[in-house]
Amino acid sequence: MRRLRRWGCIFLCLGLLWIGGLCVAAQESQIIYRYVSNSGQPRIALTFDDGPHPRYTPVILDLLAEYDIPATFFVVGSNAETYPDLVRRIYTEGHEIGNHTYHHNHVSKLNPEELSKEIALCNAAVERITNHPPKLFRPPEGVCTGALKTICGATGMTIVLWSVDTRDWAHTPVREICQNVKANTANGSIILMHDFIGKNSPTPEALRHLLPMLRELGFEFVTVTQLLEG
Ligand SMILES: [Zn+2]
């Protein structure tokens, strides 16, 4: 009996070590994408965080449609539930939808259980509206933790940050945004913008200049997933 118990303990310890190993492996193998360059025609991905929002998202969608440009929207789950028609429009117009948590809480302030719930709730909200759960995740403010990497690794979500920050979130003047983007965009760039930042967003006006400018520079616009697929 005592021997059986000893073997039981050994198997339990081995089991825990194995699970621990899986978690570490999931965490270590989780790549965080900031840009994805390729050897062909230079391609870039525009991304919009924090929406959808009735004031800015439709204007941005109109501009993208005018230039026939796809983008990726990292939506906040609670906003998606409040404005399902906007989510539907984003999806039906051929854009990609990523997960930006349900409440836009800072990742480092959540325990692993709360973080899992934030990601799952946002996925469920988007899936209810589009029938497609997001596969991409962008943490608020780009903060990545070990727990986040483990959860994304275990649930098959890809973490995507950015290589060009337009700083539209800081109400940067349009002219400055355009100069910054022109100077820093390269093959494979992922560009950070927002379709909700409170009052007087410079984003739509900046976009009006950026779309023709970047096209003129020879960049092809793709969604983040298309960029990742090479
Ligand atoms: Zn955000």
Image (cartoon, rainbow, N blue to C red):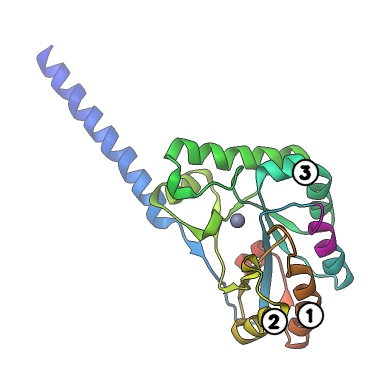
What residue sits right under mark 1 in the picture? 209
The image quadrant where one finds the C terminus is bottom right
Q: Which quarter of the rendered image does ligand 1 occupy?
A: bottom right
Q: Secondary structure at mark 1?
A: helix
x and y, in percent, of residue 47 in the image: 67, 64
Q: Earlier in the sequence, mark 1 or mark 2?
A: 2
Tell me, for residue 34, which label it has, or none.
none
- Outermost residue on the left side: it is 2
What residue sits right under mark 3 in the picture? 130
The image quadrant where one finds the N terminus is top left
Asked if marks 1 and 2 touch (Cβ < 8 Å), the reply is: yes
The segment highlighted magenta reads 54-61
Disc 3 residue type? Answer: Thr
Q: Is 208 on the left-hand or right-hand side of 126? A: right
What residue sits right under mark 2 in the picture? 178
Disc 1 residue type? Answer: His
Real-space CA distance between mark 1 and mark 2, rounded to the nearest whole angstrom: 7 Å
Residue 218's place in the image compared with 189, above or below, is: below
Q: Is residue 132 among the parts visible in the rendering?
A: no
x and y, in percent, of residue 78 in the image: 68, 41
